[in-house]
Amino acid sequence: MLEPITLAFLLDINISKMILFKRAIFLLIAMFAILNKNALAQNYTLKSPDNNIAIKISTNRKIKYSVFYKNKEIILPSAISMELAGITLGQKDGIKNTLTQEVNQTISPLYGDFSILNDHYRELRITFTKNYAVIFRAYNNGIAYRFETNFPDSVKVINEEAQFNLAGNPEAILGEAHTLTSWELPYTTYDSMSEVPRNDSAILPALFSYPGSNVKVVLAESDLLNYPGMFIYMDGSHVQGFWAGYPSKTVLGSWGNFVSVVKQREPFIAYTKGKRAFPWRAVIITDEDKKLLSSKLIYKLASPSSIRNTSWIKPGKAAWEWWSDAMLPGADIPSGMDNRNTALYKYYVDFAATNHLEYVLIDAGWSNIFHLTRVNPKINIKEVIAYAKHKHVGVFLWCVASTLIDSLKGNLHYLKSLGASGFKVDFFDRNDQQVINWYEEIAKEAAKDHLMADFHGCSEPTGLERTYPNILNFEAVRGNECDKWDTTSNPDYHLLIPFIRMTGGPMDYTPGSMRNRTKADFKPVPHGMPCSQGTRCHELAMYVLFDQPLAMLCGSPALYEKYPDVMKFLTAVPTTFDDTKVLSAKVGQYALIAKRKGANWYVGAMTNWDPKDMEVNFSFLPAEKVYHADVYTDVPESDRNAEEYNHQVIRITKNSKLLLHLASGGGAVIYLHP
């Protein structure tokens, strides 16, 4: 037994030690709290290579980002998260580590408006303790972010939170989505976001213009694979992404009862691999309208090509019968949609071969809509394709998405056995996860058979043409077909789509009308040979301004043959280019652009319904070189007769300047060759 004095002495020592121990514990707790606070709540800033764009990221409670352009906040703090079954990513999550890097590389697209793209960005990767990361990128012309997960098993995505809280009260130009089934929509312009009906929804891309400045942002997405496409809805200046639920029940219905229509949806948006990268949420930013015309941000963000051997992928122009109802006025063979036969399509092949067009596109009617192998007995399709091949012309064949996907490999093998170069697949009419997966499955399987594709009735492109370059075109635009039934595909619309829709990627507008009308004279023609809105030169300018690796000549061959000078241009103009110079442009008003292919240059000018004078400064040309220039311009009579134009050949050098007058709905094209 211890003596009292000894016990007291020991107690005194132990008490002192306990005090020290408690202090140490307190310090450790305090340090842990600080470390834990830092792990949960960090602030980061990521700047673009030119320092004009800054992303500020906070992980306090929720992951939020804001965006500054030239020191002015354009996107206020906006929350992002993903709700998975059993776990939510982006809320009070600890940070495992971060990684910042700067990448400056070049990309060589297989085709497009540039043969080389500079891909320069800074990236911040924040890895969280819950087996996921968020990656932010800052480019000189925009920002992007995406989630990455690292779970061993598949995951069910209940919902995603993607906010874009726009500062101020910007103007909005929207393709309003009253259903989740169409991307061929006219644009509605609102002078301010406060005028947009609350909870109004829209497709992507969508453009917003900030008051008091020329700053514009385009909301879009990229690398959309195995996940639904994004829509947006508006609540004041708050923009929020939303997605269609995964379909649980579909039936054939809608147009001709051949469209896959959703009757019921699941209470989740995706069921997918647990270890994957999710789509990029992208914001294109500029204070120069013309830079929107050359933005390749969506392409750069997309996954590189999955196709190793691409030598068989050949963009080009195609003669096409559907728009003009297969009518051949003056031809010595029966024509029209009811007379489509072997002889008619050989006529189209001859026209294509004579004018060095790479393809003929045979639209609906060559086979049974529900059974691809049941060929129209009036058309010996094998004979037509063999005839075309002998004349070095390829053939694309039309089909319906639901029919094609029903026996995908078999149908593609059949198209290949016919000798087709590719196919036009139509009426997807959805962008939920199931149909987005159809896009990739079709692209992947078609590549195995060396088949190219033109997607119609589809959602907007999100870089798939980079990952699968055999997909040449996407519709998702109110093209010339609309001239059959309304007035929405007009010059005002034509001067919006290059700045908005085309930021996403190629579009199959199907230009080439030779029946051109003024605003006063135009009337829709549902059957027979329709007309287009705007002048002849306005229509020709589409072949320079519009990004369309597979470009249609929608008019009747019989009409083209009346204008050999027009065919000189249409024969010469390529569908892909090596370089692009946007000389002048204003959203919704006008555009002037020059593109180079090899040694030749092509200039296109276009205006809305307002007449416009433009000066072309040819300083972009190389020195010490003289070009012969075929110049096609509006004339004073074009204001009354939109088919009137002038063609002249002049000499142009680097020091030349040329004044152009564009009529109402007018345009001009210049073909420069040494």
Image (cartoon, rainbow, N blue to C red):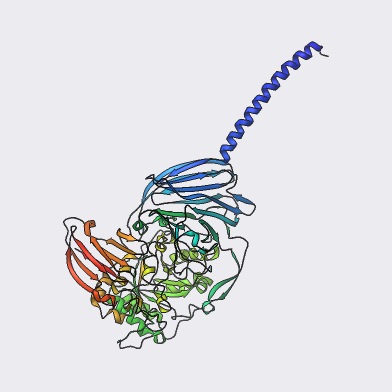
- Judge whether residue 629 can be spotted in this image: yes
Q: Residue furthest right?
A: 1
Q: Give the image location of residue 31, x and y in percent.
A: 60, 31
Residue 124 or residue 416, whichever sits in front: 124
Q: Which image quarter is the N terminus in?
A: top right
Image coordinates of residue 377 in percent, x first then y, are 44, 85
Residue 390 position (above or below residue 292): below
Q: Quadrant of the C terminus?
A: bottom left
- Residue 107 or residue 498, whichever sits in front: 498
> Which is nearer the eye, 487 or 395?
487
Q: Is residue 392 above or below residue 580?
A: below
Viewer-proximal residue, 2 or 151? 2
- Left/right of residue 470 with respect to residue 180 in the rendered view: left
Q: How many marks?
A: 0
Q: Quadrant of residue 668?
A: bottom left
Residue 645 lies, in percent from the top left, at 25, 75
Q: Position of residue 112 (x, y in %)?
A: 35, 61
Question: Residue at 46% across / 69% down in the picture?
Answer: 185
Q: Is residue 19 above or below residue 235?
A: above
**In this picture, residue 98 sits left or right of residue 315:** right
Q: Is residue 134 visible?
A: no
Q: Quadrant of residue 596?
A: bottom left
